[in-house]
């Protein structure tokens, strides 16, 4: 699931874009993705639309974006906020 994808993103050195839309990741899954974004240096585009992230999930992603300087496009539409 999302935990495995997040772990892969932590060590990824080639993937530039990933779409995880409509996977019902929710807030718990968003925290895993957020942790990966804090260390990932290659992802420039991330789609997380339609995952019911809610306020807590969005907060986790927002905190990760404070340190991630690589991501230039993120789609967070339709996430129950």
Image (tube, rainbow, N blue to C red):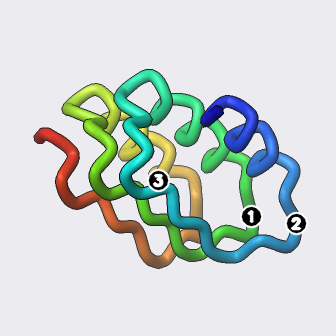
Q: Disc 3 and disc 2: Cα gap in Å?
A: 18 Å
Numbered disc in front, either 1 or 2? 2
The picture quadrant where one finds residue 24 is top left
From the image, tell me which residue sits under label 2: 13
Q: Residue at x 77, y 71 (%)?
A: 15
- Residue 72 place in picture, x, y as percent: 48, 77
Q: Is residue 67 left or right of residue 6?
A: left
From the image, tell me which residue sits under label 1: 41
**Height in image: 31 above or below 45?**
above
Dot 2: what SS? loop
> Sequence-wise, which precedes: disc 1 or disc 2?
2
Label total for image = 3
> Sequence-wise, which precedes: disc 3 or disc 2?
2
Q: Disc 3 and disc 1: Cα gap in Å?
A: 12 Å
Q: Residues within 10 Å of mark 3 (few under 14, many from 20)?
A: some
- Residue 44 place in picture, x, y as percent: 59, 75
From the image, tell me which residue sits under label 3: 65
Q: Residue at x 33, y 43 (%)?
A: 51
Of 21 and 70, which appears nearest the observer? 21
Q: Residue at x 54, y 70 (%)?
A: 71
Numbered disc in front, either 3 or 2? 2
> Sequence-wise, which precedes: disc 3 or disc 1?
1
Q: Residues within 10 Å of mark 2 (few under 14, many from 20)?
A: few
Of 56 and 22, which appears nearest the observer? 22
**Height in image: 25 above or below 40?**
above
- The answer to the question of whether label 1 and label 2 lie on touching residues, with beta carbons closer than 8 A, is yes
- Residue 20 place in picture, x, y as percent: 50, 56
Of 58 and 5, which appears nearest the observer? 5
Q: Disc 1 and disc 2: Cα gap in Å?
A: 7 Å
Quadrant holding the C terminus: top left
């Amino acid at each position: 699931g999302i935990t495995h994808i997040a772990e892969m993103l932590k060590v990824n050195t080639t993937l530039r874009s990933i779409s995880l839309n409509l996977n019902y990741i929710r807030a718990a899954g968003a925290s895993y993705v957020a942790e990966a974004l804090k260390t990932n240096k290659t992802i420039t585009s991330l789609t997380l639309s339609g995952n019911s992230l809610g306020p807590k999930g969005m907060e986790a992603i927002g905190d990760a974006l404070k340190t991630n300087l690589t991501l230039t496009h993120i789609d967070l539409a339709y996430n129950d906020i």
